[in-house]
Image (cartoon, rainbow, N blue to C red):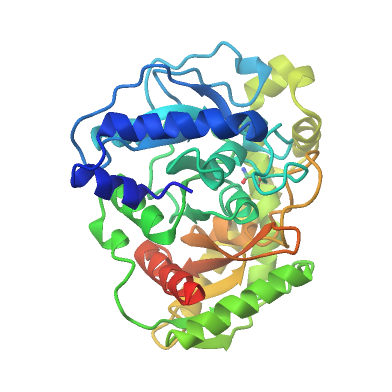
Amino acid sequence: MLSLLDLCARIDDGRLTPEGAVRLVRAAIAAREPEVGALVCVDPAPVVAAAGPLAGIAVGIKDIIDTADLPTRMGSAIYESWHPRADAPVVARLKSLGAAPLAKTTTTPFAFLDPTATRNPHHPGHTPGGSSAGSAAAVAAGMLPLALGTQTGGSVIRPAAFCGVVGVKPSFRLLPTVGVKCYSWALDTLGLFAAGVADAAHALALLADRPAIGRTHDGSAPRIGIVRQEFCAAPDPEAEAALGRAAAAAERAGAVVHDLALPARFGEAYAAHGTIQDYEARQALAWEYAAHRDALPPRLRAALDAAQGIETAAYDAARRTAHHARRSLKDVFSEDGPDVLLTYAAPGAAPAGLDQTGDSRFNRLWTLMGVPCVTLPVERTPAGLPVGVQVIARFGDDGRALAAAGLIERALRG
Ligand SMILES: NC(=O)CC(=O)O
């Protein structure tokens, strides 16, 4: 894979020019895109800045995020010819840092559950996950050093884990979702994909203008609470094995690790996610549903059909449940509690077949809680498919989640 920090270092010390770095990416795209299918389009002549902390860094932009220089199609024929006038603020921020938004990456239609044609770079017969399919696959295939995605259920963490890359779903609203096609305004969160934890931390620190996020190696040994989210169906054996391996590596690195049982109200919040998501999607996609219902893909059409019947009282009750769970989460991360939680990133490795994007059951609660989540790869199945884990910190403590993920990553490397 292409390490963002490695490219930055080579540019900074003159071994590589910004234009040379973009040429490297174009060559990698030419070599891998035919088999992976991660990209919707590539800018033939992007502006390559000569200066800036991300000068020469080509970035993939999930195709629900507005770009002024490239179309934004939402993964749907309904928006086939749509070309936003302006960049989403997160894209404008990338350009202000010197980065080159080089390609739009595939998204499931409107970032829901209907699959893309993108293939898992580790096994073409398996899904890369979704909804940020192309971003995860492009980084995993070594085509891009950085890509943006979004998460409403599990659309950053799950595909990142399936593709064996680092994925970060930051604290809710750390990055502005202005100019990003809305599915659920209470849940939609911008995230990113990179080769390693330090690469991701560096990019997020710059994007969020919060340098502390980038100091992943602060030397402290965290207290880690292992949570298995028993309110969900159990994971596959490889997910449990990866969790155990990551916990053991963390202990070897000096972390204090213990099992943690979450109070019942978190199971209630987990169940409330769907009501909030789908009630809001009914409004966010009201025009598409009214004017183009027949052009919607089957899973999304069925979800919006069902969402028509959600009572406002049920939505309000779900929001109250989520609010109480968020307050309880502060008690979980209390003074003498864990610094971070460690749990499954997905039910297991990427499922076979391209007719689905996998299950977000181990992600949805944490998206609703708005807390920072980081996934990192831990091991491979005998078929060579990656299996990851998920590190979670308290709201606003994105740097601590990344620091703990970095400690585990280094410990796994041995
Ligand atoms: N957008 C989303 O997060 C939906 C998913 O989990 O695939």
The answer to whether one can see residue 1 in this image is yes
Residue beneath the point at 64% across and 82% down: 261
Above or below 251: residue 346: above
Above or below 388: residue 21: above
Q: Residue 144 location, x and y as percent?
A: 46, 39
Q: How many marks?
A: 0
- Left or right, residue 344 beside residue 189: right
Instruction: In the displayed orientation, state which residue is furthest to the top.
Output: 81
Residue beneath the point at 56% across and 10% down: 81
Q: Residue 275 location, x and y as percent?
A: 69, 49
Above or below 153: residue 285: above
Residue beneath the point at 72% across and 62% down: 348
**9 or 374, which lies in front?**
9
Q: Residue 98 location, x and y as percent?
A: 25, 34
Identify the image quadrant of residue 7. top left
Q: Quadrant of ligand 1?
A: top right
Q: Residue 128 location, x and y as percent?
A: 67, 45
- Left or right, residue 37 beside residue 166: right
**271 or 367, which lies in front?**
367
**158 or 412, which lies in front?**
412
The answer to whether one can see residue 64 in this image is no
Identify the image quadrant of residue 32. top right
**314 or 33, which lies in front?**
33
- Left or right, residue 380 beside residue 191: right
Residue beneath the point at 29% across and 74% down: 218
